[in-house]
């Protein structure tokens, strides 16, 4: 069944997901300064073979 396959895939990547979450929550939450967080997410996406594009956001 598909649900079983998805469950196995999720479980196989559990440690990696927990490591990434731990890394993400350690990035300082500076409002208006998401550069470090963006860099981290971009790097993580690229290491997984995914495309990443950084978008500058301005706060009004």
Image: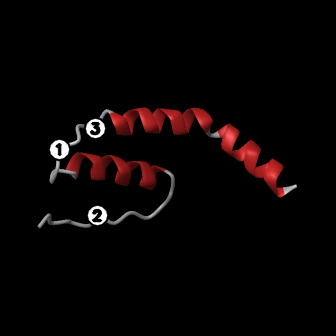
2 and 3 marks in contact (CB < 8 Å): no
| Residue drawn at 50 percent across, 57 percent down | 49
Q: Residue furthest right?
A: 1
Mark 1 → mark 2, Cα distance in angstroms? 17 Å
* Disc on res. 27: 3
Residue 15: x %, y % from top left: 58, 32
Q: Which residue is mark 2?
A: 54
Mark 2 Cα-neighbour bin, 10 Å: few <14, some 14–19, many ≥20: few
Q: Secondary structure at mark 2?
A: loop
| Residue drawn at 20 percent across, 66 percent down | 56
Q: Earlier in the sequence, mark 1 or mark 2?
A: 1
Depth order, front residue of 26/42: 26
The correct choice, above or below, for 4 with respect to 19 in the image is below
Residue 46: x %, y % from top left: 43, 55
| Residue drawn at 62 percent across, 40 percent down | 13
The quadrant in which residue 20 appears is top left
Q: Which residue is mark 1?
A: 30
| Residue drawn at 88 percent across, 55 percent down | 1
Give the total of numbered labels: 3
Mark 3 Cα-neighbour bin, 10 Å: few <14, some 14–19, many ≥20: few
Is residue 3 rendered to the left or right of residue 28?
right
Is residue 14 rendered to the left or right of residue 34?
right
């Amino acid at each position: 069944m598909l649900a079983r396959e998805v469950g196995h895939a999720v479980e196989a990547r559990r440690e990696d997901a927990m490591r990434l979450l731990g890394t993400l929550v350690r990035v300082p939450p500076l409002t208006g300064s998401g550069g470090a967080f963006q860099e981290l997410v971009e790097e993580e996406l690229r290491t997984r073979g995914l495309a990443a594009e950084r978008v500058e956001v301005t706060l009004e």
